[in-house]
Amino acid sequence: MSVLAHLAHPASELLLRRLVSAHDVRGLLIADRNGLPLVSTFATGGFEEALAAFAGGLASQVAFANAELHLGGLTYQHLMGRDRQFFFVPLSTDEVLIAVTDVTAVTANVVAMLLGTAVEMMNLVLAKHAEVAEES
């Protein structure tokens, strides 16, 4: 089971804080590589499940691209449609942070916010690992 699954409450609080401060972002989601939503700010389960499933498929394609095309790792993936944009930022080999934005959102601003969120999320994970190590 994912470490982030054990950090659902603090991770949810972090995503909500980030969502409130980013005016172009409509929702944030953390999904695992199997396409399951772990933490979400979306109110509708159907959309978050579809988005998580898409991210799971994307993760396997990115792994293939890294191996075969020698990308050197992925910083983020960006998909832009007519009505909205999707940003995918890997948190680890097992989880991805996803943002859904307005079509007019500025890519650089969204990516900067997501990378900052990823750092904060990994700090939560490291703190949890340290806590577990102290208990052992």
Image: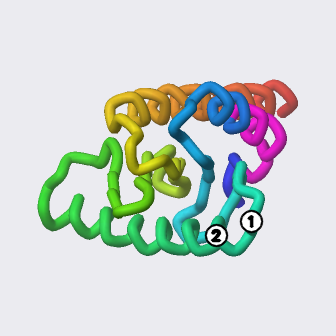
**Magenta-colored segment: predominant secondary structure:** helix
**Numbered circle sitting on residue 47:** 2
Residues shaded magenta: 5-14
Q: Quadrant of the C terminus?
A: top right
Q: Nearer the viewer, residue 92 or 129?
A: 92
Horizontal and vertical percent position of residue 118 = 52, 34
**125 lies above or below 45:** above
At mark 2, the secondary structure is helix
- Is residue 113 placed above or below 103 in the rendered structure? above
Image spot of residue 86 (x, y percent): 43, 55
Classify residue 109 as left or right of residue 3. left
Q: Position of residue 3 (x, y in %)?
A: 69, 48
Quarter assignment of residue 36 = bottom right
Task: Write the residue at 14% across / 55% down.
Answer: 70
Residues tagged 1 and 2 counted as in contact (Cβ below 8 A): yes
Residue 108 quadrant: top left
Amino acid type of disc 2?
A: Phe
Q: Residues within 10 Å of mark 1 (few under 14, many from 20)?
A: few
Looking at the image, which is closer to me, 106 or 11? 106
**Residue depicted at 78% across the width and 34% down the height:** 13
Q: CA distance from mark 1 to mark 2?
A: 6 Å
Q: Is residue 132 above or below residue 89?
A: above
Left or right, residue 72 beside residue 106: left
Residue 131 falls left or right of residue 15:
right
According to the image, label 1 marks what residue?
44
